[in-house]
Image (cartoon, rainbow, N blue to C red):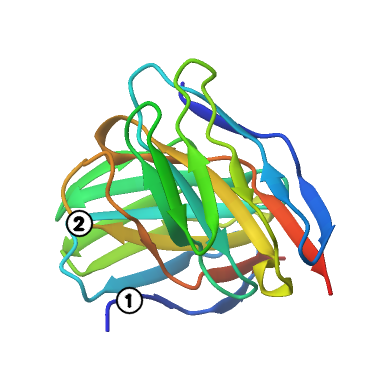
Amino acid sequence: GDSVTQTEGQVALSEEDFLTIHCNYSASGYPALFWYVQYPGEGPQFLFRASRDKEKGSSRGFEATYNKEATSFHLQKASVQESDSAVYYCALSALRGKLIFGQGTKLSIKP
Amino acid sequence: DMKVTQMPRYLIKRMGENVLLECGQDMSHETMYWYRQDPGLGLQLIYISYDVDSNSEGDIPKGYRVSRKKREHFSLILDSAKTNQTSVYFCASSPGTGKRNTEVFFGKGTRLTVV
């Protein structure tokens, strides 16, 4: 079945560091890809999406580019802030609207 | 204000008891979901509902059932709860039926502990 793999379970950075969280997917079709962010005590929130190869999604300084050949959708941010501390989920849309999530990456930013 | 509301937020049940988790949304979304969240496993889809009485199993439906009698409400039922069903449960909704690139809106979750 379809699946999403996030390489990093936890990432610890200092403010103004560059962020990369790796996301790779396996899907039988041509899925849309998403990033969601989850703050403590809250449900996941939509960050952005990309629907076709080479499309870049972005929001709040975060961005990711759909790479169909590499089956990847890596999240990046040039300069992280303490307020970016959260859990980040990569996800894909499978058949009939099913949204499949990766394991999540906990991002901790030191001031 | 668009939102997904889950009740209760916290629940403790004994093993073997029945559990009802309720979810409502005020956006008239057709599609609703139940997920569970466990450390290291991320969010796993239990059931998806495409509209009233149109439900489909997700990846981990065993031990769960659902009910959707009104578009705005989607319930998750655990008949005879087990300790391995201790988890945080999230309800979610999205517009459209089975559309691949629509945003999904999540509730704040219900933390269920089965002792």
The residue under label 1 is B3
Same chain? Circles 1 and 2: yes
Looking at the image, residue B106 lies above or below residue B11: above
Asked whether disc 1 touches disc 2, contact meaning CB atoms under 8 Å apart, the reply is no
Using the image as rendered, state which of residue B43 and residue B54 is in the foreground: B43
Q: Is residue A37 left or right of residue B96?
A: right
Which badge, 1 or 2, is on the more N-terminal residue?
1
Q: Residues within 10 Å of mark 2 (few under 14, many from 20)?
A: some
Using the image as rendered, state which of residue B40 and residue A80 is in the foreground: A80
Q: Is residue A17 left or right of residue B48?
A: right
From the top left corner, tell me how far across and down residue A16 is, in percent.
Answer: 76, 63
**Residue A87 in view (yes/no):** yes
Q: Give the SS element for disc 2.
A: loop
From the top left corner, tell me how far across and down residue B58 is, in percent.
Answer: 40, 38
The residue drawn where x is 37% and y is 26% is A53
The residue drawn where x is 37% and y is 35% is A55
From the top left corner, tell me how far across and down residue A4 is, in percent.
Answer: 55, 32
Task: Indicate the amino acid at tag 1.
Answer: Lys
From the top left corner, tell me how far across and down residue B8 is, in percent.
Answer: 48, 79
Q: The disc numbered 1 marks a residue on which chain? A: B
**Residue B85 in view (yes/no):** no
Using the image as rendered, state which of residue B74 and residue A18 is in the foreground: A18
The residue under label 2 is B95
Q: Give the SS element for disc 1.
A: loop
The residue drawn where x is 46% and y is 25% is A2
The mark found on residue B57 in the picture is none
Residue furthest to the bottom in view is: B1
Separation of residues labelled 1 and 2 (CA atoms): 13 Å
Q: The disc numbered 2 marks a residue on which chain? A: B
Task: Indicate the amino acid at tag 2.
Answer: Pro
Looking at the image, residue B15 lies above or below residue A69: below
